[in-house]
Image: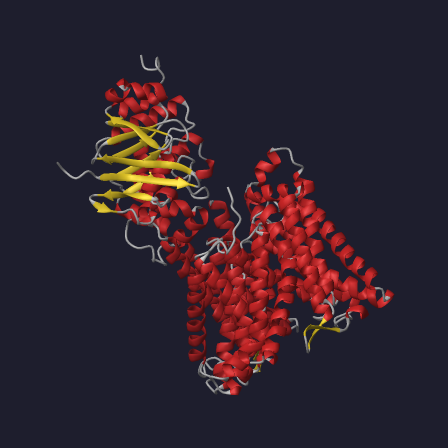
């Protein structure tokens, strides 16, 4: 127990340190575009981290998590469409609407479990996807351009790639920290207990549903923030953000990196997107390789990258 | 006469065509140790499940402290003071023994919508948990993951979790199941210490334990109660001897 | 509203429902007996469609195309079962979802590698290309009637198989208690492979029939797959009867919704608003239906009786 906690601490420190130093190093070696690549990676890391809270710690297999990514992105997009560029307002709305959606979806879905839960979250994700396609005023299937990134007063100019990078980094680190405190708190123990033995939780006096719902809302809101950041990076939103395959990809990132560790999903996002980029340089048909890799990871490397790393670290410490 | 702590009237439950429990009525007073015995399939565990609220009875009522709890879900009954241990060990395997018990303490001590403070560092949860573990003899194993504990230790943990919620009525479903002689003896002396402090409904097959500990005994057969009384009365009951105890068993 | 239009759309709804049933039957069998969630089920559908369309283009023989379509589905299904699924039966649902998701990516890409990204053209066989007068003065495409006929026949055959044969008895027993089945000495491995193959065959059949009506394109399996899952959830997982009822219900609701919601809404709101709301609501209708069913009957409409 202690070993894996210190392994986690070490890995977390390493990951944050490397990511913090990336922009200056990238500009030093003249590869500035890495900043954009890793901004995107960290945005998905936030989405994956939020999913890990309900999946890795809460045992809720949500196959509709990309919906919140889309809601957050569209909140920014739609407000920008009406000329509302204030970042605080945009992000505030993104959080509120994602949370509200998660509350509604969770309220209905959490009454089910197992395959039914997976299907109903998938279904809700699809509903939101179709809804966004039908919104012709906001571009429908073609998507919606955003003229200016979120305006957080003169302090922060998100048109600058480095500034956006560090904003995303700061939010990711903050969520990582908040997530740690959350899963160790009474609330965290409740959803972890529910994942471990739901029947016993009821017998000892917990009404599990309300805690799961709260966790679901928190995760949805966090993912909404990721969506708002995504809109800022692409300056474009479209329904494709919310395709169900995207939900599958976020799930993959959590597993690839190591479920139930919070820092694992960050590794997973890095690995997944890096793999995607690397493979697509080799061949346009990178998915034909990615697919089997995912299958192999699920079959043989279930603890993900973090699992491999922490085993190495524990062995070294003796 | 004071209202009994628990009173069950006309409880019945059927699955398909089978009456798992049929017209069950009994009462348990504060502090009483009431044993339920009967062959496998007699409906004892079904009865416990209904008392805890995990199964909805088809007819009859359950009153705790005079108030009807028949429609309450398990977590509400826990909050009213009923706790149960399971026949097949049901703990939180990845958590340590202390974590396991602390969770039960947590359920009954203020809300769990606390997001900041680490639960494992909260003395309001840890100290009562360790106290219960010490009481039951698992104090030295408090920081061991539950999955790693020996079977007998897990059975003790099973009860410790139930006790941590400070129940008025504790439903014990075969607590000594699968225990070796030493562990069983330890369990027996522990139950003897508990006796009188809280009401206990004990399902057991170990007849020595039952007759040594129980204030009253109820015998179930094929879903119905065939006799209720003091251990001496039950021992003397001819029908019970024939059906369950065996003629020469308790010479 | 024109009653003949309603009739035509009703038939369309039944035709769609029957195809959903072919997909759902395989899914529900596999899930009910092997407790396996297979997201790649849509890939068998796609493989059947592609194999049939490509073969027909090459040989112009409908019969050969059908054999190729079904054959491809069976071969791919069995291959995937032996290589991947045998290792997944013991895993939890999350693992199965993720692994089969990886398979989807793989198959979609392989199909793109062989046939490119643009849709493949699949034609209705000449002898079914005409119209049939279902009522005097009411023509309806013969091909769609043929699909309905095939689908209902397969449904009847499945009913006989599951209800009246020894294999069917094993299937029902397996759905009820698979551990017991193994303990009774049934060769569970072969049973699983057979059931899986049957499911893949039905999916491939649905795919090859769908080819001329929907586009044959990479990723075509996923939309149908989700609908098929919705069907089995509504019908009750593990129940073929439930799948049949739910498939017809879903097919009907979806088709009617897409056809009539917009004009219906236009009677109470502006045409522009109805143009937005109609298709949106129509797409969501099935999911709303599923959510409603799950709310009142969390185990679906006709759940099989389990232990």
Residue B85 in view, yes or no: no
* Image coords of residue A113 (percent x, y): 48, 54
Q: Residue at x 61, y 33 (%)?
A: C184
Given residues C153 and A16, the one toward you in this image is C153
- Residue B212 vertical position relative to residue B105 in the rendered view, above or below: above
* Left or right of A22 on screen, residue B8: left
Quadrant location, the C terminus of chain A: top right
Q: Residue at x 58, y 45 (%)?
A: C175
* Left or right of B144 on screen, residue C281: right
Q: Residue furthest front?
A: C136
* Left or right of B62 on screen, residue C48: right
- Residue B84 vertical position relative to residue C101 in the rendered view, above or below: above
- Residue B18 vertical position relative to residue C147 in the rendered view, above or below: above
Q: Residue furthest left?
A: B1
* Image coords of residue A314 (percent x, y): 55, 45
* Left or right of B58 on screen, residue C172: right
Given residues B71 and A34, the one toward you in this image is B71
Q: Number of numbered discs present?
A: 0
* Image coords of residue C302 (percent x, y): 52, 53
Q: Quadrant of residue B82?
A: top left
Q: Residue at x 14, y 38 (%)?
A: B2
- Residue B53 vertical position relative to residue C19 in the rendered view, above or below: above
* Image coords of residue C106 (percent x, y): 70, 60
Residue C269 in view, yes or no: yes
- Coloring basis for residues: secondary structure
């Amino acid at each position: 127990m202690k070993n894996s906690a210190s392994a986690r601490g070490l890995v977390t420190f390493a990951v944050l340190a490397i990511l913090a130093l990336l922009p200056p190093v990238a500009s030093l070696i003249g590869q500035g575009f890495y900043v954009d690549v890793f901004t995107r990676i960290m945005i998905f890391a936030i989405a994956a981290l939020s999913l890990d809270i309900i999946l890795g710690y809460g045992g809720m297999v949500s196959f509709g998590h990309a919906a919140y990514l889309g809601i957050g992105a569209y909140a920014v997009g739609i407000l920008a469409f009406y000329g509302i560029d204030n970042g605080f307002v945009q992000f505030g709305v993104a959080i509120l609407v994602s949370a509200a959606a998660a509350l509604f979806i969770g309220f209905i879905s959490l009454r089910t479990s197992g395959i039914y839960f997976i299907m109903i979250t998938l279904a809700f994700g699809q509903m939101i996807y179709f809804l966004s396609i039908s919104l012709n005023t906001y571009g429908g299937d073609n998507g919606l351009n955003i003229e200016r990134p979120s305006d957080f007063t003169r302090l922060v100019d998100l048109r600058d790639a480095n500034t956006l990078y560090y904003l995303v980094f700061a939010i990711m680190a903050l969520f990582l920290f908040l997530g740690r405190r959350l899963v160790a708190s009474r609330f965290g123990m409740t959803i972890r207990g529910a994942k471990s033995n739901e029947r016993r939780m009821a017998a000892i006096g917990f009404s599990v549903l309300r805690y799961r719902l709260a966790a679901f809302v928190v995760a949805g809101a966090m993912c909404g923030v990721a969506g708002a950041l995504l809109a800022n990076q692409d300056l474009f939103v479209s329904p494709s953000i919310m395709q169900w395959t995207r939900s599958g990809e976020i799930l993959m990132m959590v597993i690839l990196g190591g479920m139930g560790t919070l820092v694992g999903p960050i590794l997973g996002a890095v690995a997944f997107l890096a793999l995607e980029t690397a493979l697509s340089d080799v061949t346009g048909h990178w998915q034909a390789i990615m697919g089997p890799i995912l299958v192999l990871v699920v079959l043989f490397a279930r603890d993900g990258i973090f699992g491999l790393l922490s085993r190495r670290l524990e062995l070294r410490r003796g | 006469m004071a209202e009994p702590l628990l009173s069950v009237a006309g409880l019945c439950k059927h699955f398909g065509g089978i009456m798992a429990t049929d017209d069950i009525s009994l009462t348990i007073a504060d502090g009483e140790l009431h044993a339920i015995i009967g062959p496998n399939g007699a409906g004892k565990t079904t009865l416990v499940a209904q008392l805890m609220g995990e199964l909805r009875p088809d007819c009859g009522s359950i009153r705790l402290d005079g108030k009807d709890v028949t429609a309450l879900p398990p977590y509400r009954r826990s909050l009213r003071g009923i706790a149960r241990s399971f026949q097949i060990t049901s703990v939180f395997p990845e958590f340590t023994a202390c974590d396991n018990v602390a969770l039960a303490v947590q359920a009954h001590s203020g809300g769990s919508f606390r997001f900041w403070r680490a639960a494992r560092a909260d003395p309001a949860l840890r100290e009562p948990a360790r106290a219960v573990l010490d009481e039951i003899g698992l104090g030295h194993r408090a920081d061991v993951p539950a999955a790693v504990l020996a079977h007998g230790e897990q059975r003790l943990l099973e009860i410790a979790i139930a006790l941590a919620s400070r129940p008025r009525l504790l439903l014990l479903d075969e607590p000594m199941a699968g225990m070796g002689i030493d562990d069983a003896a330890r369990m027996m002396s522990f139950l003897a210490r508990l006796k009188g402090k809280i009401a206990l409904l004990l399902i057991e097959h170990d007849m020595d334990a039952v007759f040594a500990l129980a204030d009253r005994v109820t015998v179930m057969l094929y879903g119905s109660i065939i006799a209720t009384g003091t251990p001496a009365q039950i021992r003397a009951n001819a029908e019970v001897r024939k059906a369950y105890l065996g003629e020469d068993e308790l010479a | 509203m024109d009653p003949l239009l309603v009739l035509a759309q009703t038939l369309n709804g039944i035709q769609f429902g029957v195809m959903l049933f072919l997909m759902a039957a395989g899914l529900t069998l596999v899930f009910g007996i092997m407790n396996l969630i297979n997201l790649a089920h849509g890939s068998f559908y796609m493989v059947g469609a592609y194999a049939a369309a490509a073969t027909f283009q090459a040989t112009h023989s409908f019969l050969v195309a059908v054999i190729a379509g079904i054959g491809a589905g069976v071969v791919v299904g069995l291959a995937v079962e032996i290589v991947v699924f045998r290792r997944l039966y013991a895993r939890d649902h999350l693992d199965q979802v993720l692994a089969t998701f990886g398979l989807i990516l793989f198959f979609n890409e392989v199909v793109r590698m062989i046939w490119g990204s643009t849709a493949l053209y699949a034609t209705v066989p000449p002898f079914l290309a005409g119209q049939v007068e279902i009522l005097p003065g009411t023509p309806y495409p013969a091909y769609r009637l043929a699909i309905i006929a095939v689908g209902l026949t397969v449904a009847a055959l499945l009913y006989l198989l599951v209800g009246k044969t020894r294999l069917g008895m094993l299937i029902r027993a397996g759905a009820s208690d698979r551990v017991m089945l193994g303990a009774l000495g049934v060769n569970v491995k072969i049973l699983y492979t057979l059931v899986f193959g049957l499911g893949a065959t039905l999916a491939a059949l649905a795919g090859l029939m769908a080819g001329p009506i929907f586009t044959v394109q990479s990723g075509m399996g996923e939309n149908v797959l989700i609908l098929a899952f919705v069907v089995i959830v509504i019908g009750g997982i593990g129940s073929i009867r439930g799948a049949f009822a739910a498939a017809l219900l879903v097919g009907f609701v979806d088709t009617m919704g897409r056809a009539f919601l917009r004009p219906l809404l236009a009677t109470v709101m502006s045409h522009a608003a109805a143009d937005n709301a109609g298709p949106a609501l129509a797409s969501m209708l099935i999911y709303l239906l599923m959510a409603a069913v799950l709310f009142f009957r969390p185990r679906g409409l006709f759940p099989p009786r389990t232990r």
